[in-house]
Image: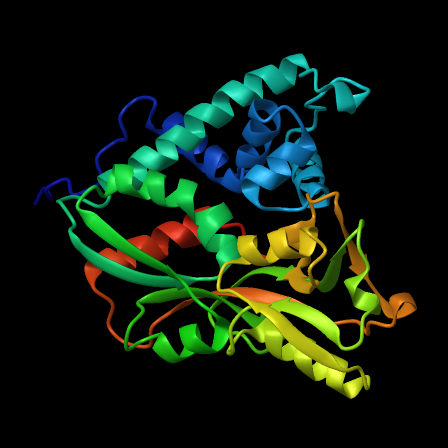
């Protein structure tokens, strides 16, 4: 008796070659989006330093990312000397692809989130993030989710931690090193600062310009000076870092800031042990979500910030 032919159908012509090509692509080295973003930023910002400020990274971190990208492709991206920022031919080709790949990534994320998402997200953030980092990102987020309203409040450490859950869906908050929760975004030295044109640090008691009670930096300042046997007085209190920095620039008092806050202020200088001011602890900035079910709008913002905010490496 003749059996029915149950053999597997012959593959169509070229199928093996297509499968081999697919496997080859999967095995190939991938261009990491954060490296491509660094390249585009260096070119569009016209330098490593402005690119680092734009991406809220250190210049060293941006240089390392460009070096990793060059190692990945096996070519130099910039002509030597690199400080002139002249792209090589390979750099010009990759820059074009980098822009297209980043745009395609944004398009894919938007397509994967169909439907109109609406609602309100309540978020707390430190002054640095609320004024320097988040505005441009939230503008981009609003282009994708125009029906989501974001209530962003600037807060001090203790208050934001207390409100996370009851009042805030998300926070970007400051912690002593090793004490934060969530996603570590950056580490910042905390410094004493004084105007180069004045010497309030030589007064007794030392006049201070500080954030309100509950601020991590205020607590560290008061505890450190007390432990060192220095008398101090809070001459000015404000919830605005810009107000405090202006007072310090005027020579009114000694301020306590994260180093990134005053790094561009040439009129300020840091105080150290040689000036009689003990070193302060370093702070860490953490993105944290409430320990409860988040509204869909808050989930969208959280995922967006995870994608866009540089993380500590």
Q: Residue furthest left?
A: 1
Q: Nearer the viewer, residue 100 or 177?
A: 177
| Residue 165 visible in this rendered orientation of the protein | yes
Horizontal and vertical percent position of residue 98: 50, 27
Return the x and y of residue 135 as percentages of the image width and height.
41, 44
Left or right position of 263 against 311: right
**Farthest right residue?**
274
* 145 lies left or right of 159: left
Q: Nearer the viewer, residue 16 or 188?
A: 188
Frontmost residue, 253 versus 136: 253
Image vertical order of residue 16 relative to residue 133, above or below:
above
Which residue is farthest top?
A: 89
Observer-nearest residue: 131 or 88? 131
State which quadrant residue 65 falls in. top right
Q: Is residue 81 above or below residue 156?
A: above
The quarter of the picture where the N terminus appears is top left
Question: Residue 26, percent across and down?
Answer: 47, 39
Q: What residue is rendered at 55% in x and 21% in y?
A: 95
- State the quadrant of the C terminus: bottom right
* Residue 74 image-quadrant placement: top right
Up-down relation of residue 182 to residue 91 (above or below): below
Instruction: Kindly identify the residue that appears in the image at 81 percent across and 84 percent down.
Output: 228
Examine the rendering and report whether any part of residue 72 can be seen: no
Tally the numbered discs.
Answer: 0
**Colouring method of the image:** rainbow
């Amino acid at each position: 008796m003749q059996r029915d032919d149950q053999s597997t159908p012959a593959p169509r012509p070229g199928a093996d070659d297509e499968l081999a090509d697919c496997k080859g692509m999967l095995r190939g080295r991938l261009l990491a989006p954060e490296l491509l973003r660094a390249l585009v930023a260096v070119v569009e910002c016209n330098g490593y330093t402005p690119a680092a400020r734009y991406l809220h990274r250190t210049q060293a971190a941006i240089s390392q990312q460009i070096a990793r990208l060059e190692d990945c492709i096996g070519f130099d991206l910039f002509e030597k000397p690199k400080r002139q920022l002249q792209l090589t031919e390979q750099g010009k080709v990759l820059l074009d692809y980098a822009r297209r790949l980043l745009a395609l990534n944004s398009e894919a994320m938007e397509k994967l989130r169909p439907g109109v998402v609406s609602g309100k997200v309540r978020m707390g953030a430190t002054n640095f993030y609320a004024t320097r980092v988040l505005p441009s990102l939230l503008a981009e987020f609003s282009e994708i989710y125009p029906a989501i309203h974001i209530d962003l409040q600037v807060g001090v450490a203790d208050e934001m931690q207390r409100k996370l859950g009851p009042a805030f869906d998300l926070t970007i908050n400051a912690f002593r090193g090793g004490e934060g929760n969530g996603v570590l975004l950056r580490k910042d030295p905390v410094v004493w600062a004084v105007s180069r044109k004045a010497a309030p640090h030589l007064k007794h008691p030392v006049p201070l310009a500080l954030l309100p009670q509950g601020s991590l930096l205020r607590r560290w300042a008061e505890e450190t000076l007390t432990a060192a046997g220095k008398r101090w007085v809070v001459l000015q209190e404000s919830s605005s870092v810009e107000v405090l920095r202006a007072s310090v620039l005027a020579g009114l008092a000694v301020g306590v800031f994260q180093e990134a806050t005053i790094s561009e202020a040439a009129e300020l200088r840091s105080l150290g042990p040689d000036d009689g001011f003990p070193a302060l602890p370093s702070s860490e900035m953490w993105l944290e979500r409430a320990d409860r079910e988040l509204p869909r709008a808050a989930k969208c913002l959280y995922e967006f910030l995870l994608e866009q905010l540089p993380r500590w490496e």
